[in-house]
Amino acid sequence: MDQQAFESIQDGIRRKYAEVSTSAEGKFAYPTGREGALFLGYDRALVEELPREILASFCGVGNPFALGPIETGESVLDVGSGAGFDMIVASRYVGEGGQVCGVDLTPEMAAQARKNLALAGVANGEIREGSSEAIPFNDASFDVVISNGVLNLSPQKELSFREILRVLKRGGRMQFADIVLEEGAEQANACSIDAWSD
Ligand SMILES: C[S@@+](CC[C@H](N)C(=O)[O-])C[C@H]1O[C@@H](n2cnc3c(N)ncnc32)[C@H](O)[C@@H]1O
């Protein structure tokens, strides 16, 4: 893929998720927000304890925490951290001695996540703007990389997985939820930036 096509896809994704950063309602074909989190089996007590606005932009497609435990004291990176809900969940598992970081392509999403982390009282969280293809963290920094509904959007998936491997510590693990196309896209959609960012 040439650089121009790559940047054009990223611009389309940023435009879409700048809108989602205020609310995901009505913008996806699957349940989002608080209802989406409950549908995906997140801990009801945690969902109900959080201020409602924290979940307004949640648009995950699965539950990365259902794939395995996150231990106290671990360092976790959320690739495509959106408005920060999964970072907040991860912070409850790792506790004060752990660390939770996020990276997101869309500045408005990163800003929303910073607000939400503050609202949820997460003191050991850090969000950087950037992409899965060039993760802005050092080699071997994390015990776990999580991601929820993001890697399907990466125009360079192999590079994204190489980057995830780079930032994982030796013996680290990845727990991600995502969507896949089971059949080829129709030609009209295959060439549409809006369809890509949907
Ligand atoms: C479907 S939303 C999911 C957000 C969040 N994980 C959640 O569960 O609510 C996709 C998010 O990934 C971000 N994103 C898309 N492509 C990305 C990439 N290549 N690298 C980093 N973030 C990306 C978007 O800005 C958006 O915030």
Image: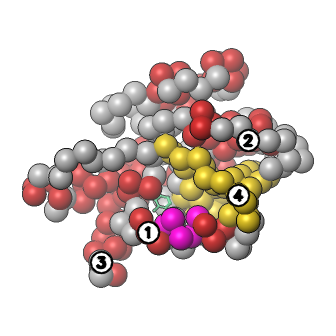
Q: Is residue 3 left or right of residue 107?
A: left
- Which residue does the image show at 50% across and 27% down from the upper left? 40
- Of mark 2 and mark 3, the one earlier in the sequence is 3
Does ligand 1 reach within 8 Å of label 4's beta carbon?
Answer: no
- Which residue does the image show at 42% across and 51% down from the upper left? 17
- Of mark 3 and mark 4, the one earlier in the sequence is 3
Q: Is residue 47 above or below residue 8?
A: above
Residue bearing mark 2: 70
Residue 74 visible somewhere in the drawing: yes
Q: Which mark lies nearer to you, 2 or 3?
A: 2
Q: Is residue 23 left or right of residue 175?
A: left
Distance in Å between CA atoms under marks 1 and 3: 12 Å
Please report contact status of discs 3 and 4: CB closer than 8 Å, yes or no: no
Q: Quadrant of residue 172?
A: bottom right
The three-letter amino acid code for the residue at tag 4 is Gly
Q: Is residue 63 above or below residue 130?
A: above
Distance in Å between CA atoms under marks 3 and 4: 30 Å
Question: Does dot 4 land on a helix, a strand or a loop?
Answer: strand
Residue bearing mark 1: 158
Residue 126 visible somewhere in the drawing: no
Residue range corresponding to the magenta coloring: 160-164
Residue bearing mark 4: 172
- Of mark 4 and mark 1, the one earlier in the sequence is 1
- Of mark 1 and mark 3, the one earlier in the sequence is 3
Residue 1 - label: 3
Q: Which mark lies nearer to you, 3 or 4?
A: 4
